Image (spheres, helix red, strand yellow):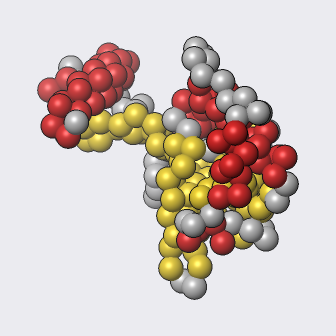
Amino acid sequence: MNYPPQHHQDNDINHMIEVMKTYPLATLISVENNAPLITHLPLVYEEGKLIGHIDIYNPQAKVLKDNKDVTIIFAGPECYISPSIYSTTQLPTWNYIKVHLKGTVRAIESKAALKQSLITMTEFLEAPDHKYELKPDNPRLDKNLNYIEMFEITITHWEGKFKLSQDKNPKDKTAAREELIRANQENLRQFLDKVF
């Protein structure tokens, strides 16, 4: 038996790129001395590569060099699916969208490249409204370049995990889609009311 089931796999790289663009905060995992190092940071996709920046004091920064292997996870929307939303008898489940990538990382030493990359990432993250522009002559930008390292990950393996009730009938698939939208909006509001 194949796991995960084939109908929960999405091998369309364009779908995975959409997840990365819409939910760019990635979980970056590397291993050093048999211990995992994990950081959450935004990564920007550029033609088979991911570009990122990390604080020099982060222990993982020392590992992101010299073609080391890394694993990256991007998380899209997710939610519990109650059988009550279906028109047919089902069991409870959890629907989600995740992208798992493997790649090799190398450090980019150029301060000029780092500076331009920070500007480019800000433009990407500000889209579509672009209410803020990080300008090259910003004194805070220059002041902080010595505390940030840039890295580039060449993607060597792609895996899309899109568990979206694909094995259900069309009416139930639509109900699951609507529940994913509704639950993500409502859960966010309720969560923020409790913690913020």
For residue 102, say whether it is visible: no
Left or right: where does residue 162 sit relative to residue 181?
right
Q: Is residue 131 above or below residue 123?
A: above
Q: In the figure, residue 106 lies in which quadrant? A: bottom right
Q: Residue furthest front?
A: 139
- Identify which residue is drawn at 73% across, 45% down: 142
Q: Residue furthest bottom?
A: 33
Left or right: where does residue 193 sit relative to residue 57?
left
- Identify which residue is drawn at 65% across, 42% down: 140
Q: Is residue 137 above or below residue 175?
A: below
For residue 168, say whether it is visible: yes
Residue 96: image location, x then y, percent: 39, 39
Residue 76: image location, x then y, percent: 46, 37
Q: Is residue 7 above or below residue 130?
A: below
Image quarter in which the C terminus is found: top left
- Identify which residue is drawn at 14% across, 26% down: 84
Left or right: where does residue 43 sit relative to residue 117?
left
Q: In the figure, residue 68 lies in which quadrant? A: bottom right
- Identify which residue is drawn at 59% across, 79% down: 32
Q: Nearer the viewer, residue 7 or 144?
A: 144
